Structure formats: structure tokens, C-alpha cells
Image (tube, rainbow, N blue to C red):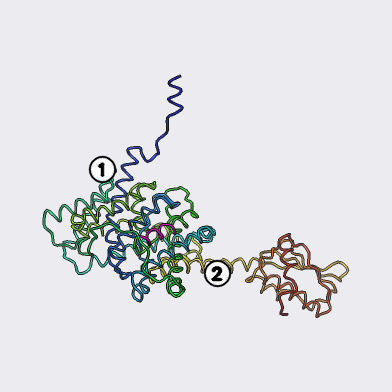
């Protein structure tokens, strides 16, 4: 009986409490925290704010999204995409208007999330996703080049040693993430040998106090709303797009599913929290997410610890963290770049098999992203090209055949395919309006009307036959097409 009671009231532990998983999550969070520091400082400089603003934003975003987000193991922090959007606002109006913008952007993201904007991810084709991943890898690599220019010669062998450790250590053991060992070893060598190389401290001053809670010091009126609204909407859209794409990427890598709707409004909640603590806002951080996932992390704990470790490192251990050589972090990011790039997508064998249109979409996504340094622009350009090429292909799949009745009085036209704005315009010219048959039947059993353009085309065809003294009967419409035709026919003007 006692054994039965024991089994009955035993509560199973969360999976992440297993010693092996817990160790992986903790160490992955630590590696991410170390990699976040120079990135957050750099993005703060881009946005035109004090490094503390970016560092505090990275802390609050990571901790908040670990609770609110819909994609475990994904890292959110201050990002370059958001920094580029808000930089003009900071330059013209200052920090307080930035904070108000971050809070409003969070509200917009929550609204968009609840409206189901995450469902739009299904319209992003695979070729755009591949282009997004490849462009991301290139941008991560390019972001490291400034750290390799006009630096002491010792930096280059240090980066090489770091990469050797990162790639070589897993052959011996995977108990500890190799990027973390690389950072520790190179930092130790720098301190022991007193090497004069760029360090984290050279990137900007680290904070020595905790962030404080408060509202932005701006007038709460229409004038302020007019100033911040355009930037808030831009920040919300860029943040959501980058976060949704990153979540999908992690889904594919980990072979798991995430709640995109929750992630959308969770990003909004995290930005509101970040704004209330005086941060610059942010979104999913792709490079650091890849570090986290490649280190084996799979739960929310790693994300929470990344933010927590970041705060501890910069506030409590700032002097020690400041001594980390940038070469160590450059090596980690180069590793992330190489492992993120989809090398299979550019293999000659793959390119020969892949349709040219798919390759064109991937290339455009990469080129636009790399040129603009904005992942959102690249994704939008890729999706637009993919939709255009798809519409063009589908437009040519519409077919028109005709037969004449035995008595020669009725011409039957059979239309098959999908009728919409791109295909229906060509359809108009395929009918023979001078045919001597007195009665015309247009059979749409094998077709479907998708928009007003297709209905307008049928009206134009009918009207032209009437002008030639013919009677027209349209048959075979399915339920949805018939409803659309009855609602719009004769009310679209023209012809």
C-alpha cells in the first residue's frame, strides 16, 4: 500500500533537471552571454545610444522571452536590424523618445500576434528560407571583419587557435561546449602572456549598476505619437519578421515545433518590459541563437540563463569580462557563420537539379540582404520574386478548347486551370468572337475563379459575344466561384 501511495504522489521532474541536460543548458547560456556582450555594445553604437542601453536590453529581452516566447532555446536581444530602424529617431529626438518607441512597438507586436500575423509564415517559400540562412551566415562573417583589420598580428594566430579548439575539441569530448573552452583558453593566454590585443573592454564601458524601472520622460500627447508611431511600426514589423524566420530555422534544425503566435506576442511583451527598463528593444538574435542551438541547448532555461549571466558578467564581473580578447569571440562567430551556411544549396550538383526560378529567388534574397545589411529587406524581396514567378507559371497553365455541336448552332468552350489576374487577361483574347455559331457555352467545370479580375474577364467575354449577336451561357462553376461570380458580375464597370 505504501509503495502504491509513493508511486501515486511522486511528481516527475522537468526534463531539463536531468544532470546532463542541465549542464548543457547552463554552459550554452554562458557561451551565449559572452558572445552577446560585444554584439550588444556594437548595436548600441549603431543606434547612437550608450552601451548600457544595449546591454540592459539584451538582458531584459532574453529573460522576458524565455518566459513569454513560443520557441524554446531561441535568443532574443538587442539586434542590428532594430538598431538601424531606430538610429534616425535617436539622432533627432534622443533616448527618451526611443524608449517610448520601444514600448509602442511592443504593443503593436502584441496586437499583430493576436491577429494571427504569424500565420503569414506559410507564404515564405523554401528558396527564400535558404537564402535567408545563407545571407545570415555571410552577414555574421562580414560583421567580424572590422575586428580583423588594423589589429596586431597576434590576433590572426589567436583566431586560428580558437577555431582549431572549436572544431577539434568535440572529437575528444563534448562534455563542455568547445566555444566556451576556446574563450577560456585564449583569455588565459592573453592574461598570462600579457598580449596587447583588442579586448571586450575596448568596445565600450560596461555598466556597474542594475537597470531601473520607469516610464519615458516624454509628453504623452498626439504630437509624440506622430513622432514615434512610424518608427514603432517599422521596429515591430522588422522584429517580427526576423523572429519568425529565426523560429522557423530553429524548428528545422531541432526537428521540433514552436508556437509562432505565442512568439509574436511574446516579442511584444519582451519589448514592453525592455522599454520600461530603459532598453533599446530588440528581437530574435540569429547568430546567438545558432550558438545556443549548436551548443546543444533545447529549452527555455538556456535563454533565461543567457540573460542572467549577461547581467552578472557585465555588472559583477565587468573587469574580468573586459579582458576577454575579441579574437576569441571572432573565432566563435566565424564558426557560427560556417556552420550556419547551407553549403548543400550551392553545390554544383544541387544547382544543376534546382529549377532556375528557385535559384534566382535564393540569390536575390542573399544579394538584397547582404547589400542592405537588413534580413527583412532580403526576405521581402525574395517572397515578392517567388510570388511573381509562381503567378507567371500558373498563368500559363490555363487551357481553352472548343467544340461545335452537331447542328452547328452551338460553340462549346471548355476552360481548365486557375483564373486570376495574371491568367484571365490572356484568356479574353483566346475566344473566336466571329464564330458563326449563334449560341456560346463557356464550361468552367475544370476551372476556378480566384479574384475580381477573372470575373471581369468573363463579363468582357460575354459582352463582346453579345455585341456580335451571340447568346452566352456560363456553366460548371463550383460553389465558391459561383458565389464570387454572382456577387461581382455586372458591377465591375468597363467593357
In this view, 90 is above or below 106:
below
Please give the range of residues in magenta. Answer: 268-276
Q: Position of residue 160 (x, y in %)?
A: 22, 57
Left/right of residue 3 with respect to residue 335 in the rendered view: right
Count residues near mark 2 (Cα–Cα under 10 Å), then give few for <14, some for 14-19, many for 20+: few
Residue shown at 62% from the left, 68% from the top: 395
Would you say the residues marked 1 and 2 are in contact, meaning their CB atoms lie under 8 Å apart?
Answer: no
In this view, 222 is above or below 268:
below
Measured in 3D between alpha carbons, the distance from the residue under mark 1 to the one under mark 2, in whole angstroms, is 50 Å
The residue to which callout 1 is attached is 172
The residue to which callout 2 is attached is 388
Asked if residue 371 can be seen in this view, the reply is yes
Q: Position of residue 256 (x, y in %)?
A: 46, 47
Q: Position of residue 164 (x, y in %)?
A: 24, 52
- The answer to which quarter of the image holds residue 131 is bottom left
Q: How many marks?
A: 2
Decide which of tag 1 and tag 2 comes sooner along the chain.
1
Of residues 145 and 199, the one drawn nearer to the viewer in this rendering: 199
| Residue projecting furthest to the right | 407
Q: Is mark 1 on a helix, strand or loop?
A: loop
Of residues 230 and 484, the one drawn nearer to the viewer in this rendering: 230
Q: Is mark 2 on a helix, strand or loop?
A: helix
Q: Where is residue 430 in the image (x, y as percent from the top left)?
A: 71, 74
Specify the principal SS of the magenta part: helix
Amino acid at each position: 500500500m505504501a509503495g502504491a501511495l509513493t508511486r501515486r504522489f511522486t511528481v516527475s521532474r522537468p526534463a531539463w533537471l536531468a544532470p546532463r541536460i542541465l549542464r548543457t543548458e547552463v554552459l550554452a547560456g554562458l557561451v551565449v552571454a559572452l558572445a552577446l556582450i560585444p554584439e550588444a555594445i556594437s548595436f548600441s553604437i549603431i543606434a547612437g545610444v550608450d552601451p548600457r542601453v544595449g546591454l540592459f536590453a539584451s538582458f531584459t529581452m532574453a529573460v522576458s522571452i524565455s518566459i513569454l516566447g513560443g520557441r524554446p532555446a531561441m535568443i532574443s536581444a538587442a539586434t542590428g536590424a532594430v538598431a538601424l530602424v531606430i538610429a534616425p529617431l535617436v539622432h533627432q529626438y534622443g533616448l527618451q523618445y526611443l524608449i517610448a518607441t520601444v514600448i509602442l512597438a511592443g504593443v503593436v507586436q502584441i496586437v499583430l500576434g493576436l491577429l494571427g500575423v504569424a500565420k503569414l509564415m506559410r507564404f515564405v517559400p523554401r528558396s527564400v528560407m535558404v537564402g535567408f540562412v545563407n545571407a545570415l551566415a555571410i552577414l555574421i562573417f562580414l560583421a567580424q571583419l572590422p575586428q580583423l583589420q588594423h589589429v596586431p598580428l597576434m590576433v590572426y594566430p589567436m583566431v586560428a587557435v580558437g577555431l582549431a579548439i572549436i572544431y577539434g575539441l568535440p572529437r575528444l569530448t563534448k562534455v563542455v561546449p568547445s566555444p566556451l573552452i576556446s574563450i577560456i583558453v585564449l583569455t588565459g593566454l592573453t592574461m598570462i602572456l600579457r598580449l596587447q590585443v583588442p579586448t571586450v573592454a575596448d568596445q565600450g564601458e560596461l555598466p556597474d549598476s542594475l537597470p531601473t524601472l520607469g516610464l519615458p520622460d516624454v509628453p504623452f500627447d498626439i504630437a509624440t505619437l506622430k513622432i514615434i508611431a512610424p518608427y514603432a511600426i517599422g521596429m515591430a514589423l522588422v522584429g517580427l519578421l526576423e523572429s519568425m524566420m529565426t523560429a522557423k530555422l530553429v524548428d528545422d534544425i531541432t526537428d521540433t515545433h514552436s508556437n509562432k503566435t505565442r512568439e509574436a506576442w511574446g516579442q511584444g511583451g519582451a519589448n514592453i518590459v525592455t522599454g520600461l527598463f530603459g532598453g533599446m528593444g530588440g528581437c530574435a538574435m540569429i547568430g546567438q541563437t545558432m550558438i545556443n542551438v549548436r551548443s546543444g541547448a533545447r529549452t527555455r532555461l538556456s535563454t533565461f540563463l543567457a540573460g542572467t549571466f549577461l547581467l552578472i558578467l557585465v555588472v559583477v564581473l565587468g573587469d574580468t569580462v573586459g579582458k576577454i580578447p575579441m579574437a576569441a569571440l571572432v573565432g566563435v562567430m566565424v564558426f557560427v557563420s560556417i556552420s550556419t551556411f547551407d553549403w548543400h544549396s550551392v553545390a554544383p550538383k544541387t544547382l544543376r537539379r534546382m529549377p532556375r526560378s528557385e535559384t534566382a529567388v535564393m540569390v536575390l534574397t542573399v544579394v538584397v540582404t547582404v547589400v542592405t545589411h537588413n534580413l527583412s529587406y532580403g526576405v521581402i524581396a525574395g517572397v515578392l520574386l517567388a510570388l511573381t514567378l509562381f503567378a507567371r507559371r500558373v498563368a500559363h497553365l490555363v487551357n481553352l478548347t472548343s467544340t461545335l455541336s452537331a447542328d452547328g448552332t452551338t460553340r462549346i468552350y471548355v476552360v481548365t486551370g486557375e483564373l486570376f489576374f495574371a491568367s484571365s487577361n490572356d484568356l479574353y483574347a483566346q475566344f473566336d468572337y466571329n464564330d458563326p455559331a449563334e449560341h456560346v457555352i463557356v464550361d468552367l467545370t475544370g476551372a476556378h475563379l480566384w479574384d475580381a479580375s477573372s470575373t471581369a474577364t468573363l463579363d468582357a467575354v460575354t459582352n463582346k459575344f453579345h455585341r456580335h449577336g451571340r447568346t452566352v451561357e456560363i456553366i460548371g462553376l463550383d460553389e465558391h466561384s459561383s458565389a464570387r461570380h454572382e456577387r461581382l458580375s455586372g458591377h465591375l464597370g468597363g467593357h
